[in-house]
Image (cartoon, grey):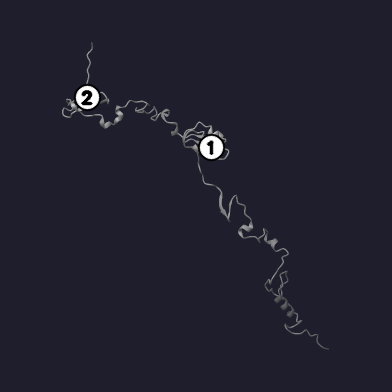
Amino acid sequence: MANKLQFRRGPAANRTNVTPASGEPIWLTDSKKLFVGDGQTPGGIDIFGTLGSAIYKDAGTGANQVLTLDGSGKIPEGVLPSLAIGQPFEVANQAAMLALTAQPGDLAIRTDESKSYVLKATPANVLSNWILLRTPTDNVLSVNGKTGAVTINKSDVGLSNVTNESKAQLFTSPNFTGNPKAPTRALSDDSTHIANTAWVKDWVNSLGLAVEGGDIDGGTF
């Protein structure tokens, strides 16, 4: 029968009952921890205590195990819960949204109303579990007191009496009202300018037909 070498061992509750010699290991059978004696400290010294509890855990993806990275230095995708990655779904209507196999955080983009919803809780077939993602409206806030799809005309901006005509058109056969004024042209002006009353008086006087304010006298013979 082969000989075997066993460390001093026992439960954690009895560890301090012994003072191991310097370099002597002590194994705790219940907590799976290793202590080493220094010849003075009861129960020995926890040489791995400063390394954290992960040193005592098995590697793996199960409960109370230490997760290891994959070959690319990243967390394996298979251990990530589905709710950690929100997935978008494009659906045609409410019925299609409620039929989704979705997890909290997933998005449903409704093409029938151009709106998006996020699932806050399962099950996905309950409408109240979907929250509408609200966005600012794009309506015009106000144009002269009007909102929404706005159409304005000249009366909305105080231009009711304005017509869309060229300058030449505006002065074709105009009708004057009130007491319009025109500049007094020189008597030698032979053009189509407007002759005002002052010009007419000057022209009459220049002919010697009458003195302003006087009588017209045919003379004697």
In the image, 92 versus 196, the foreground residue is 92
- From the viewer's perspective, is residue 61 above or below residue 194? above
Quarter of the image for residue 17 reads: top left
| Left or right of 44 in this view: 174 | right
- Label 2 CA crowd tier, 10 Å (few <14, some 14–19, many 20+): many
- Image quarter where the C terminus lies is bottom right
Is there a contact, CB below 8 Å, between mark 2 and mark 1? no
Callout 2: SS: strand
Residue occupying image coordinates x 29% and y 27%: 56
- From the viewer's perspective, is residue 195 above or below residue 60? below
Residue occupying image coordinates x 69% and y 62%: 170
Rendering coords of residue 186 (x, y %): 69, 74
Q: Which residue is mark 2?
A: 26
- Image quarter where the N terminus lies is top left
| Left or right of 188 in this view: 140 | left
Q: Which residue is mark 1?
A: 109
Residue type at tag 1: Ile
Picture disc at residue 98: none
Quarter of the image for residue 207 reads: bottom right
Residue occupying image coordinates x 55% and y 33%: 96
Quarter of the image for residue 168 reads: bottom right
Among numbered discs 2 and 1, the one appearing first in the sequence: 2
Disc 2 versus disc 1: distance between alpha carbons?
62 Å
| Left or right of 32 in this view: 126 | right
Rendering coords of residue 82 (x, y %): 45, 31
Callout 1: SS: strand
